[in-house]
Amino acid sequence: DAGVIQSPRHEVTEMGQEVTLRCKPISGHDYLFWYRQTMMRGLELLIYFNNNVPIDDSGMPEDRFSAKMPNASFSTLKIQPSEPRDSAVYFCASSSPGLYGYTFGSGTRLTVV
Amino acid sequence: GEDVEQSLFLSVREGDSSVINCTYTDSSSTYLYWYKQEPGAGLQLLTYIFSNMDMKQDQRLTVLLNKKDKHLSLRIADTQTGDSAIYFCADVSGGYNKLIFGAGTRLAVHP
């Protein structure tokens, strides 16, 4: 298995633009998580899905953030409009009951200028 | 809510042992995890321990759990320069579903 695949690896965008981050979980994993990592706040759980259904989005910082999982093999995290303070590394992770811990993707480094 | 705390930085000499400490608040934790993050990479699961265990050993890694004090530690024997990374302690919150991470301990290994 290729692991959790995220794209793009790096994204530089101007303030006010829409940004879409993508994630392909490991086949067969029915949990998908989006985390954000910054120096100031560490790793924050933004939202997670179970069987494509959002279960807990209490970590989503603002209405500018939205996440979808239209099917078991794809999820997106969208920021519209983006702001400089959204600059961070965004990680996607997947897991399944019976497995220990999560498998993380390599992350998307977002820079908003 | 649940909280996981770690010291932020540790510097050791190559060949020495490293001990990274973590405290957590959720008394109902069933699993606790250690993850490693190398520069520019995602988090990699290093090891985990069940809450009914006191110790787990895996090659150079030893995990100690003191459930009474809610204290978890990771010992790396014979630390190598390749062990330089950020180490995260994580606790499961709300049952299986949510991993809550500490701030991470940056381990620097010098000759």
Image: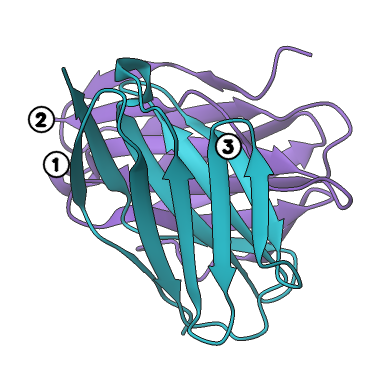
Chain colours: A purple, B cyan
Three-letter amino acid code of the residue under disc 2: Val
Residue B9, how many percent across, how many down? 18, 48
Q: Is residue A14 left or right of residue B91?
A: left
In front here: A7 or B24? Answer: B24
Characterize the local packing of mark 1: few (<14), some (14-19) or many (20 or more) Cα atoms within 10 angstroms: some
The residue at 55%/61% (across/down) is B64
Q: Nearer the viewer, residue B67 or B43?
A: B67
Residue at (55%, 39%) from the top-left corner? Answer: B61
Q: Give the residue number, with chain letter if any, for mark 2.
A: A113
User: Which image quadrant for residue A103?
Assistant: top right
Q: Residue at x 30, y 26 (%)?
A: B84
Q: Tags 2 and 1 in contact by the CB under 8 Å rule?
A: yes
Quarter occupied by the C terminus of chain B: top left
Q: Chain of mark 1?
A: A
| Dot 3 amino acid type | Leu
* Residue indicated by mark 1: A84
Indicate the chain on which mark 2 is placed.
A
The residue lying furthest to the top in this view is A2
Q: Which mark is residue B46?
A: 3
Residue A102 in sight in this render: no
Tag 1 or tag 2, which sits nearer the N-term?
A: 1
Label 3, label 2: how far apart the Cα atoms are: 35 Å
Q: Nearer the viewer, residue A4 or A66?
A: A4
Q: Are marks 3 and 2 on the same chain?
A: no
Q: Secondary structure at mark 1?
A: helix
Q: Nearer the viewer, mark 3 or mark 2?
A: 3
In the image, what residue type sits under mark 1? Answer: Pro
User: Which residue extends farthest left?
Assistant: A113
Residue A60, how many percent across, how many down? 44, 61
